[in-house]
């Protein structure tokens, strides 16, 4: 049986139905940090990439422009993916759009790069966190990358009215060390569209 939490899905469908890009704290006109991390990894343009909880991010649009050919975006909200697909226009047919709770996602292939900015930190139950960690481990090819950004130890305690879990470099390593080695990590202050600040931490892991 699928383990979709109805309340969570309703929450996110409602967010993307009622709020514009500029009205949600996580929005970036250009996801420059993620783009520069991906560039630094020097992976092939034909690599299999997934953006988990991609929402209304412009990451996939920018990666398409850079010539990446195997892009997948997963989100619990169909509204979010419809919006992103519409922004991209005709090239959106080259993207695989997956509406799913990440906790019940069963990928049919492995990925060279799994990207998650501001989705994992919404998992607050130990069982869900472990399910995610096992999923990313089984879904990334050996030598592939897992790029994650979450609120840092000094970041907000909530996002979009929901509880989150804040992470440090050490606590991310603890969660993902089984299967991955840490390549790099750094902190970043995100300026929201309404000019508040949110402290994030990025970690780049490589699959053993
Ligand atoms: C704060 S937004 C971040 C969006 C995007 N990654 C970005 O950086 O702009 C979190 C996203 O995660 C999605 N999400 C939340 N819980 C999820 C889950 N359990 N499975 C899949 N997506 C989820 C939401 O719909 C939302 O689009």
Image (spheres, helix red, strand yellow):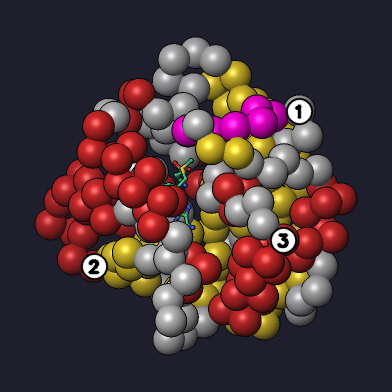
Say if 85 sits above or below 94 in the image.
above
Left or right for 2, reference 40? left
Say if 112 sits above or below 55 in the image.
below
Q: Label 3, secondary structure: give it.
A: helix
Residue count near mark 2 (Cα–Cα under 10 Å), binned few <14, some 14–19, many ≥20: few
The residue that label 2 is drawn on is 94
Q: Quadrant of residue 146?
A: bottom right
Q: Which of the numbered marks, if any, corresponds to residue 124? A: none
Left or right for 96, reference 160? left
Q: Which of the numbered marks, if any, corresponds to residue 154? A: 1
- Find the magenta span and give its range: 155-160
Say if 124 sits above or below 130 in the image.
above
CA–CA distance in space, label 3 to label 2: 36 Å
CA–CA distance in space, label 1 to label 2: 38 Å
Comparing labels 3 and 1, the label whose residue is closer to the camera: 3
User: Is residue 143 visible in the rendered structure shown here?
Assistant: yes
Residue count near mark 3 (Cα–Cα under 10 Å), binned few <14, some 14–19, many ≥20: few
């Amino acid at each position: 049986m699928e383990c979709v939490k109805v309340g969570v899905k309703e929450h996110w469908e409602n967010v993307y139905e009622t709020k514009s890009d500029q009205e949600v704290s996580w929005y970036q006109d250009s996801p420059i940090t993620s783009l520069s991390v991906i560039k630094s990894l020097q992976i092939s343009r034909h690599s299999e990439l997934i953006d988990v909880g991609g929402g209304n991010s412009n990451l996939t649009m920018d990666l398409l422009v850079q010539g990446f050919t195997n892009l997948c975006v997963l989100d619990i909200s169909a509204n979010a993916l419809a919006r992103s697909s519409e922004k991209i226009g005709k090239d959106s047919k080259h993207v695989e759009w997956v509406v799913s709770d990440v906790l019940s996602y069963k990928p049919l292939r492995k990925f060279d790069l799994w990207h998650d900015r501001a989705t994992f930190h919404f998992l607050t139950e130990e069982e869900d966190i472990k399910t995610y960690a096992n999923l990313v481990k089984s879904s990334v090819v050996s030598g592939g990358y897992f790029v994650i950004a979450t609120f840092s130890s000094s970041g907000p305690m909530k996002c979009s009215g929901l509880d989150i879990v804040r992470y440090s470099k050490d606590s991310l390593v603890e969660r993902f060390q089984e299967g991955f080695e840490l390549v790099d990590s750094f902190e970043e202050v995100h300026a929201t569209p309404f000019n508040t600040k949110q402290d994030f931490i990025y970690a780049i892991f490589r699959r053993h």
